[in-house]
Image (spheres, rainbow, N blue to C red):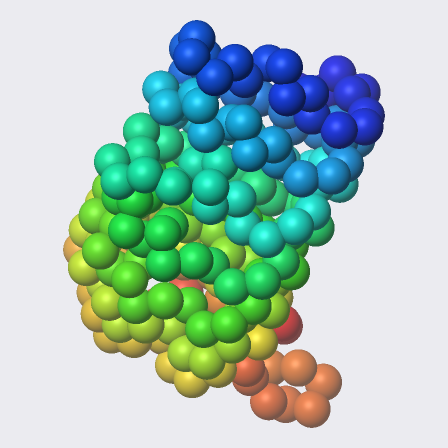
Amino acid sequence: GNNKLDGYIPTEIFPRDTCVLEKLDFKSNELTGIIPFQMRYCDKLESASFMENNLAGLFPTQQFFSTYGSSMKKLNLARNQFGGFLPDELFLNGKALSHFDIRGNMFYGEISTKFGEMLNLKVLNLAENFFTGELPMELGNLFGLAELNVTFNDLSGSVPSEICSLRNIERLESLSADCLPGSNGVRKMVCSCCDQCVVG
């Protein structure tokens, strides 16, 4: 990371039959375009960071989660220009994920109840997107979750008691939501257990 790289990510670094990459760090550069489809050849890849670039397109399903049993554990797409819905393949094939950070993009739709099936998650950062609806109570199934950030979205309703219970047993160390009232006195969300409330 931090190498002042610009332009497209070269496809040549992901050879079809010989890619043995386990970790990839492209954070804080000026990369553009999409994440190459050839990255799917690197089936041993466990950690990838593309944070703070100018990458765009839909969620990179084929690159990381096209096959069942993906080895990806840490994926950071924060502060790029990705958008669209989060695909079902993420939840079906991404169950090894422990860190998932997509803050600062343009993803939208409701936060899937299927996040509650990703039992290895420790960090889930969905902040600064366009998610709507309410937080699913199924997130309360994530007993290993230490950090949950959903600030600066278009969410509404109350943070479910199932999630607050993770705070009560001191597993969920950080919970952030849009639960401060704005200038009109209205809160987007109600949260009785958040340690950080912002005006979303």
Q: Quadrant of residue 113 in the image?
A: bottom left
Does residue 11 appear anywhere in the picture? yes
Which quarter of the picture shows residue 95? top left
Report the side of 81 relative to 189 (left or right).
right
**Would you say 133 lies left or right of 31 here?**
left
Q: Nearer the viewer, residue 40 or 100?
A: 40
Question: In the figure, residue 21 lies in which quadrant?
Answer: top left
Q: Nearer the viewer, residue 133 or 173?
A: 133
How many numbered callouts? 0
Asked if residue 128 can be seen in this view, the reply is no
- x 30%, y 44%: residue: 93
Q: Is residue 18 left or right of residue 104?
A: left
Indicate the quadrant containing the N terminus: top left, top right, bottom left or bottom right: top right
| Image point (42%, 12%), residue name | 17
Q: Position of residue 4 (x, y in %)?
A: 80, 20
Indicate the position of residue 174 as horizontal and vertical percent values: 40, 52
State the residue at coordinates (55%, 82%).
188
Front residue of 142 and 74: 74
Relative to the observer, which residue lies in front, 180 or 160? Answer: 160
